[in-house]
Amino acid sequence: MGGGAKTNPTIGADGGAMNDPSIYEIVIRGTASERLLARFSDDFAIDVTGDGNTRLIGEIRDSAHLNGVISHLAALTISILSITPGDSTSPDSNHNTERQ
């Protein structure tokens, strides 16, 4: 038997394979501290939703980058509620929004 295991590519915003950078919205359970999310502050705008969850919005370069973000959140035992490609109503991904 030959070859390694085949993996499916991550699905992009258009429903096809993710080959180009795309904006993603990642919603995690609860209000995460700035310290906890410091690793993401350069790449994502971070804000708190009306229902008290935390939203990260930023550009994901490719499927490996998305998998790395997910793995990092999982390593911090953060519950991911949703991952949505192509949010056009997101804040500017180059600046964090203020938390209150």
Image (spheres, grey):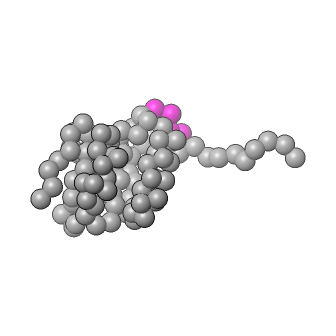
> Residue placed at 24% from the left, 36% from the top?
94
Asked whether residue 16 is in view, the answer is no
Residue furthest to the top in view is 20
The secondary structure that most of the magenta stretch takes on is loop
Q: Where is residue 96 drawn, in percent x and y?
A: 20, 44
Asked whether residue 66 is in view, the answer is yes
Q: Where is residue 99 drawn, in percent x and y?
A: 15, 55
Does 18 sit left or right of 26 as displayed? right
Residue furthest to the front in view is 35
Q: Where is residue 91 drawn, in percent x and y?
A: 21, 44
Q: Is residue 71 above or below residue 20?
A: below
Does 67 sit left or right of 23 as displayed? right
Does 7 sit left or right of 26 as displayed? right
Residue furthest to the right in view is 1
Q: Where is residue 56 drawn, in percent x and y?
A: 30, 50
Residue stretch rendered in magenta on the structure: 16-20
Give yes or no for residue 71 being in the magenta stretch: no
Q: In the picture, which quadrant includes the C terminus?
A: bottom left
Determine the image quadrant of residue 92. top left
Q: Give the camera-side residue of 35 and 7.
A: 35
> Residue placed at 25% from the left, 45% from the top?
45
Give yes or no for residue 18 being in the magenta stretch: yes
Determine the image quadrant of residue 78. bottom left
> Residue placed at 70% from the left, 45% from the top?
6
Q: Is residue 43 above or below residue 72?
A: above
Q: Give the camera-side residue of 35 and 82.
A: 35
> Residue placed at 32% from the left, 40% from the top?
43
